[in-house]
Image (cartoon, helix red, strand yellow):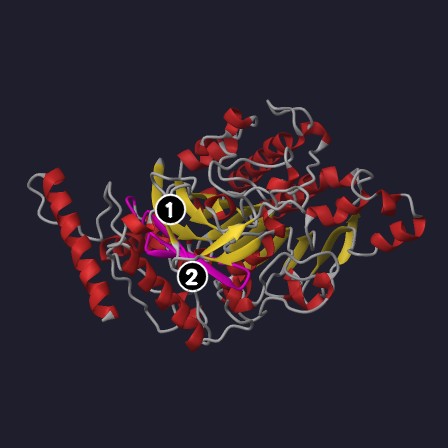
Amino acid sequence: MKAIAMKTARLFMHAALVAACTLTAGAQQGPAPLDTPATTDDTFLAEPVAGKKNLEPAIVRPAQEKAAAERLAARQQRYGSAPNIVLVLLDDVGWGDAGVYGGGLAVGAATPNMDRLAREGLQLMHAYSQPSCTPTRATIMTGQLPIRTGMLRPMLPGEGAGGRGVDPQATLAQKLKEAGYVTRAVGKWHLGEFKEAQPQNVGFDHYYGILTSSDDYTAWREPWRNPDLIQDQARKAWASQAEVMAIVEGSPGEEAQPVFPIDHDSIRRVDAQLTDHAVRFIEGTKGGKQPFFLYFATRGAHNDSYPHPDFVGTSLAKYLYEDVIVELDHRIGQLHAALERAGQLEHTLIFITSDNGPFAEAFPDTGFTPFRGAKGTCYEGGVRVPGIAYWQGTIKPGRVSAGLFDLTDLYATSLALAGAADRVPSDRFIDSIDQSSFLLADDGASRRRAVYYWAGNAFMGVRIAEFKFLVKDHVYQHDDTWPRMSPFQGTIQNSLYGGKLFNLLVDTKEEHAMLPLKQPHAPVLKEAADTHLATFKAYAPPVPVQ
């Protein structure tokens, strides 16, 4: 009966769409083919296909996949190698902070470099992270949702000294290394601080960066926050041992060693140090034929914000967070210029994104999102992030897309661009989808039909096309918390009547749940959720699903 109901719902929606297309398209017969980009979303009724049983099903788009493959082959013939990949991962930067996303000067900080790369490349309007940083970073490195790796939340001070890290044999860096890439990690890691979990021992040829989150180096030092630590010498000494208070550096087989001490003054120079290191690496590739993967993860704009002295007061707002945004935009410009000087710009995909939405508790030291919620939640404000894909001469300039893109997709997409799609693991479920044709075809459309929302090990819901179906609520305003609205001190509650359904195109703030009015849509979304949850029976996760 359930299958019949679902089939009936699909037929009902298909008939409605056909009628709508007939009324609006004149002579056009029926809906546009799935391989044709359209002004209306074509994914709600799509039937995605799994290439293998352990892969997330993807929409098949033969024409764009053929066009992208031909473009990639021509590039490889011209340059003699697979393309370089530079991934820029910002920290806690909001969807609306960059000018091209409605921010920039409108929210107090100009972002000319990010705006330029977006205008000259592909701007993703519906890119998704996880609700917080460690889970997102794990998904990028593994192509798996956090529930499959057990890396469910940010590591607190001291927690990264042992326990769980990413599988060193299956990281994106390791797979690209096996495919002939030079792999370099620069910046924030936050996926384990013990030797075996450090970047240089999970696939990167070299690491230079900070092993944990920016606030771990500074929050305990703040007199307004922790006078009990600062004014007590014994406690102060104890707190200073919680992390390695420095930028560290290391090569495979080694434990990374401190090279740049971090205190309240020097932390202002961390992003400059990271950028200088990355620029030297890029410039050293001039004339080289071996492709490289540069993972560049910034310290800023994680709270508390400490702009470089040269950038203090340079934003329109004159607030510290906005000054840091101006600095980070400048750092991205430095990377772009280094690629150009090295003669690598036309042979490099640059992808810029953020690990999650802004951290609301730090207001006013926080970013901007026009959506509901913030970091720590599965509402759009917590997981909708900027996504800019730039590749001079390869990605058609001026593209803006509403297609779904999950940051897990960076895994399979990068391997496909490297000519190493066969290196995607087959012994575990992979949530990543190869989106290379979406990026490279002039009018490419997303191959992802569904985005899944998770908070820790709690399945929260699914999005298909413009519809978001939540099966649980996140309540994060309580009288006994500080601040009162605190996602990281929130609770998860089951929905009394089965869930809430939002239309994210007309209700971006998720204020009007419409499930009773959207009965034909509900079976489609519920079926997608059930299909997703069934993968955890075939591939058991390390922690139970709630």
**305 left or right of 233?**
left
Image point (24%, 50%), residue name: 42
Looking at the rendered image, the quarter that the N terminus falls into is bottom left
Instruction: Write down the residue under mark 2.
Output: 432
Work out whether 503 lies above or below 142.
above
Q: SS class of the residue under badge 1?
A: loop
Q: Nearer the viewer, residue 529 or 273?
A: 529
Residue 199, image quadrant: bottom right
Image point (53%, 35%), residue name: 368
Residue positioned most to the top: 316
Q: Amino acid at mark 1?
A: Ala
**364 left or right of 170?**
right
Badge 1: how crowded within 10 Å, few (<14), some, or many (20+)?
some
Q: Amino acid at mark 2?
A: Ser
Give the distance between the C-alpha atoms of the residues marked 1 and 2, in whole angstroms: 29 Å
Q: SS class of the residue under badge 2?
A: loop
Q: Earlier in the sequence, mark 1 or mark 2?
A: 2
Instruction: Tell me which segment is drawn in magenta.
Output: 442-471
Residue positioned most to the left: 27
**281 left or right of 506?**
right
Marks 1 and 2 in Cβ contact (< 8 Å): no
Instruction: Write down the residue under mark 1.
Output: 513
Image point (65%, 58%), residue name: 206
Badge 2: how crowded within 10 Å, few (<14), some, or many (20+)?
many
